[in-house]
């Protein structure tokens, strides 16, 4: 029995490394101790591990190993969900502690995911992936997202300058925020360089698809253009900077220069980009 424990530890470590390498190559992942957030596909990914009882081998040990792996995945999911950034200065855990988000609501959310197929390693160790849609977490947070530690960003005046209308209406907006230090969040605000709010909580409409957040993130403009929400004729803009909350925190809000902001305003007037959540922000890998 003594020699088995180190072997199990080695196997679990190798399984974790394999999971991380496999998913990191296919998506924009922000890694955490217990899993990762796939900001491109809008998913929280965790993996759980379980071992069979010492007195049950082979097929007889598979059911309890699967049960243990699922329980471990749910524990890991809870830990990761509480670390998700709502914006640059607020996490899900902070909303729970402040009483702005109910524990029962998060419990319901944790039970809304789906398990992958169990995989078995030598010794009967089971690993199983658990996926949770970020959009459903975003919906849980939506009632307080606009006031969760946010600056009060002024709305642009009615006569704010706009660029000329494009001959063909844009289907979405891709903002290249690479090299600005921007980090992803459930509810970023897109601002112009004078501090006027272009897009964010309160301006986004509820998604028909609960798996959608108000923006998606991608690792390249080409990959962003392949996301279904963006359509076939997106407008490409470049962020001038990334901004944090006035009291500090993580920079999660892209800032557009005045010219880019004019094009943004014209595009959203011409088509229902904000109502269809057709906004993707390109960032460096977390």
Image (cartoon, rainbow, N blue to C red):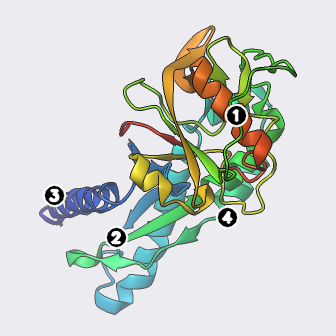
- CA gap, disc 2 and disc 4: 25 Å
Residue 31 image point, x, y percent: 38, 44
Q: Compute the Cα span from label 1 to label 3.
A: 67 Å
Q: Are marks 1 and 3 in contact (CB under 8 Å)?
A: no
Q: Residue, x 38% and y 37% (percent of image)?
A: 286
Q: Secondary structure at mark 3?
A: helix
Residue at the far left in the pictured view: 3
- Distance CA(mark 1)–CA(mark 4): 45 Å
Labels 1 and 4: the sequence-earlier one: 4
Q: Residue at position x 43%, y 37% from top?
A: 283
Residue 4 versus residue 286 in the image, above or below = below
- State the CA–CA distance, disc 4 to disc 3: 35 Å
> Is tag 1's residue or tag 3's residue first in the polypeptide sequence?
3
- Numbered tag placed on residue 6 in the rendering: 3
Mark 2 or mark 4, earlier in chain: 2
> Looking at the image, is mark 1 or mark 2 earlier in the sequence?
2
Q: Which residue is mark 1?
A: 164
Q: Image height check: is 216 above or below 95?
A: below
Instruction: Provide the residue designation for mark 4.
Output: 112
Q: Residue pushed farthest bottom?
A: 59
Callout 2 secondary element = loop
Q: Nearer the viewer, mark 4 or mark 3?
A: 4
């Amino acid at each position: 029995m003594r020699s088995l424990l180190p072997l199990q530890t080695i196997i679990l470590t190798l399984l974790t490394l394999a999971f991380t390498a496999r998913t990191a190559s296919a998506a924009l992942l922000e890694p955490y101790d217990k899993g990762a957030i796939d900001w491109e596909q809008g998913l929280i990914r965790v993996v759980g591990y379980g071992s069979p009882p010492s007195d049950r081998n082979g097929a007889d040990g598979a059911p309890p190993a699967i049960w243990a792996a699922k329980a471990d995945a749910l524990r890991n999911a809870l830990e990761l969900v509480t670390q998700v950034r709502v914006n640059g200065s607020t996490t899900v855990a902070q909303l729970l502690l402040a009483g702005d988000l109910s524990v029962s609501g998060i419990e319901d959310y944790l039970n809304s995911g789906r398990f992958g197929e169990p995989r078995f390693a030598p010794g009967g160790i089971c690993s199983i992936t658990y996926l949770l849609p970020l959009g459903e977490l975003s919906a849980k947070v939506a009632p307080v997202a606009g006031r969760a530690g946010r600056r009060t960003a002024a709305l642009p005046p009615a006569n704010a300058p706009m660029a000329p209308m494009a001959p063909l209406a844009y289907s979405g907006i891709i903002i290249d925020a690479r090299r600005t230090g921007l980090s992803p969040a459930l509810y970023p605000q897109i601002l112009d360089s004078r501090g006027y709010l272009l897009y964010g909580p309160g301006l986004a409409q509820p998604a028909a698809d609960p798996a959608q957040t108000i923006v998606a993130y991608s690792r390249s403009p080409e990959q962003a253009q392949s996301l279904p929400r963006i359509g076939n004729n997106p407008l490409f803009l470049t962020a001038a900077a990334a901004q944090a909350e006035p009291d500090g925190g993580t920079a999660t809000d892209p800032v557009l220069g005045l010219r880019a902001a004019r094009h943004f305003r014209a595009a959203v007037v011409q088509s229902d980009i904000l109502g269809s959540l057709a906004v993707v922000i390109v960032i460096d890998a977390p």
